[in-house]
């Protein structure tokens, strides 16, 4: 009687154990995947939101003060009025965020202009690259300056670009803000 | 006893099996479910694109060019003006709207440009629209108005160009003078319609249309000749002697519209 009962118990137990473990493993897998997806989605959302806001700030505001220069700037903006860009501000902006220039704009003189000033755009720890082209995508120069600045993407983990249209000297131009990062660091 | 136990096991097994299959199916689906990348930021980006597009075209004057050509076309999509409006719209929106975004551009109810091959509209995950009002444009309506001035030599009087009006038609005027006599005549003489206007009271009456450049200029001249404003013209004259001159005036777009320029975007 005992033997027979033990045999029945063993078969049912093994089957139940197998099912239980399979379900448990699937649950853990689901938990891991969902957490990872949510974290990625949230991280991307924050990155996208900051990029969109920064691009908006550049093409629609004049900055603080309204006639800012590299020495008195508090907030950066490239417009004279909404979606009408100023050549002078663009040239100043290129200098202000040039990663290859070291003008000693902050206490640590070993830092590039870009590293000193990138906080002005409110992107947190994300890197960025800003480019202004003609509407058809061809390059242009403004007062002899190629309107591109920031840090070009390299070995990026994730990258997104926000394109906005504006007017410069009566012509429609395309501005592209590329925001990127290289590691899985959180920038929330 | 064994039979009873056997039935119980089968029912339990069926029940457990059903639950297990459902659990597996649910978990499998959940594991392979990917949350959409579309967020509120995506919508915001799309909306900024639509606002940018119309705003820069408006500030550059392109919307006015499109509006003029569209108005002149009168809705005839085989006309040269329609082609101009369509080509301008297509040229700019193809460049302004990113390549993964579908668009459709309307002026009132007319579709002037669209690209539905970039993104399937029916399965789009984000859609928005922006519009601007173009004052002074209406399909088939002229973009210029009429101004008129009137002169008479005997008695000598004249009035200069007045308000801008959509039309310059004329009228068959009946004028009453201080001696209570009446005179009738077509003003201008080339008028061949049936409208009857009167200046036999304090104000022009009958079928007088104050929005007709000829009639309005005539009424101003008659008031000029009615020094005491009693509705009786001071000196008798032949209405045919009144000379009218009409000019075409631009920049009078407020006569029409507004037309609604609308861009719809989706991705």
Image (spheres, coloured by chain):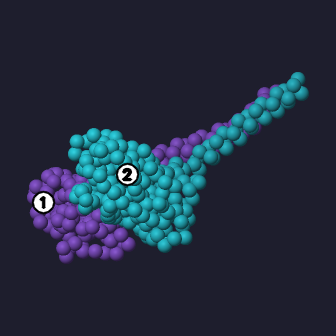
Chain colours: A purple, B cyan
* Side of A33 relative to B251 (left or right): right
Residue B186 x %, y %: 41, 57
Q: Nearer the viewer, residue B163 or A102?
A: B163
Q: Residue at image x 76%, y 33%?
A: B15
A147 over B30 or under it: above or below: below
Q: Nearer the viewer, residue B139 or B255?
A: B255
Residue B247 visible within the image = yes
Residue B160 visible within the image = no
Q: Secondary structure at mark 2?
A: strand
Residue A105 x %, y %: 12, 60
Check the residue under mark 1 and report the chain it is in: A
Q: Farthest residue toward the top?
A: B1
A38 over B107 or under it: above or below: above
The quadrant in which residue B30 appears is top right
Identify the mark at residue B183; answer none if there is no mark: 2
The residue that label 1 is drawn on is A69
Q: Residue at image x 32%, y 67%?
A: A172
Q: Residues within 10 Å of mark 2 (few under 14, many from 20)?
A: some
Residue A12 x %, y %: 74, 35
The quadrant in which residue B88 appears is bottom left
Q: Residue at image x 37%, y 51%?
A: B183
Q: Secondary structure at mark 1?
A: loop
Q: Residue at image x 29%, y 52%?
A: B236
Q: Nearer the viewer, residue B217 or A86?
A: B217
Q: Residues within 10 Å of mark 1 (few under 14, many from 20)?
A: some
Q: How many angstroms separate mark 1 from mark 2 (CA)?
A: 77 Å
Q: Where, quadrant-wise, is the N terminus of chain A in this rendering?
A: top right
Check the residue under mark 2 and report the chain it is in: B
* Side of B133 relative to A126 (left or right): right
| Tags 1 and 2 on a common chain | no
Residue A78 x %, y %: 23, 59
């Amino acid at each position: 009687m005992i033997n027979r009962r033990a045999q029945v118990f063993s078969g049912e137990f093994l089957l139940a154990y197998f099912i239980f473990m399979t379900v448990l493993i699937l649950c853990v897998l689901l938990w891991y995947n969902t957490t990872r997806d949510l974290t990625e989605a949230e991280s991307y959302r924050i990155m996208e939101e900051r990029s969109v806001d920064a691009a908006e700030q550049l093409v629609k505001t004049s900055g603080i003060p309204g006639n800012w220069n590299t020495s008195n700037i508090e907030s950066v903006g490239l417009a004279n009025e909404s979606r009408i860009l100023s050549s002078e501000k663009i040239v100043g902006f290129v200098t202000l965020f040039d990663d290859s220039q070291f003008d000693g704009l902050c206490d640590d003189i070993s830092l590039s202009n870009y590293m000193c000033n990138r906080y002005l755009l409110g992107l947190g720890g994300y890197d960025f690259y800003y480019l202004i082209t003609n509407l058809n995508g061809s390059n242009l120069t403004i007062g002899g300056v190629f309107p591109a600045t920031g840090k070009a993407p390299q070995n990026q983990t994730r990258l997104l670009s926000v394109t906005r249209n504006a007017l410069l000297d009566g012509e429609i131009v395309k501005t592209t803000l590329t925001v990127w990062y290289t590691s899985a660091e959180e920038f929330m | 006893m064994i039979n009873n136990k056997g039935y119980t096991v089968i029912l339990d097994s069926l029940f457990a099996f059903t639950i297990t299959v459902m659990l597996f199916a649910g978990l499998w689906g959940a594991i392979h479910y990917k949350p959409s990348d579309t967020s509120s930021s995506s919508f915001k980006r799309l909306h900024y694109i639509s606002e940018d597009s119309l705003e820069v075209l408006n500030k550059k004057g392109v919307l006015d060019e499109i509006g003029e050509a569209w108005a002149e076309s009168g809705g005839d999509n085989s006309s040269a003006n329609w082609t101009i409006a369509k080509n301008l719209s297509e040229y700019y929106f193809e460049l302004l709207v990113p390549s993964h975004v579908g668009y459709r551009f309307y002026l009132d109810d007319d579709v002037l440009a669209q690209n539905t091959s970039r993104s399937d509209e029916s399965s789009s995950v984000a859609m928005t629209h922006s519009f601007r009002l173009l004052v002074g444009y209406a399909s088939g309506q002229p973009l210029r108005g009429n101004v008129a001035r009137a002169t008479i030599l005997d008695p000598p009087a004249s009035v200069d160009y007045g308000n801008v009006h959509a039309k310059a038609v004329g009228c068959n005027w009946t004028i009453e003078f201080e001696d209570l006599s009446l005179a009738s005549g077509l003003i201008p003489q080339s008028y061949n319609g049936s409208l009857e206007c009167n200046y036999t009271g304090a104000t022009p009456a009958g079928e007088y249309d104050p929005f007709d450049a000829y009639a309005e200029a005539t009424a101003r001249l008659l008031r000029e000749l009615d020094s005491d404003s009693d509705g009786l013209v001071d000196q008798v004259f032949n209405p045919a002697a009144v000379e009218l001159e009409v000019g075409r005036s631009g920049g009078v777009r407020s006569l029409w519209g507004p037309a609604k320029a609308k861009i719809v975007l989706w991705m």
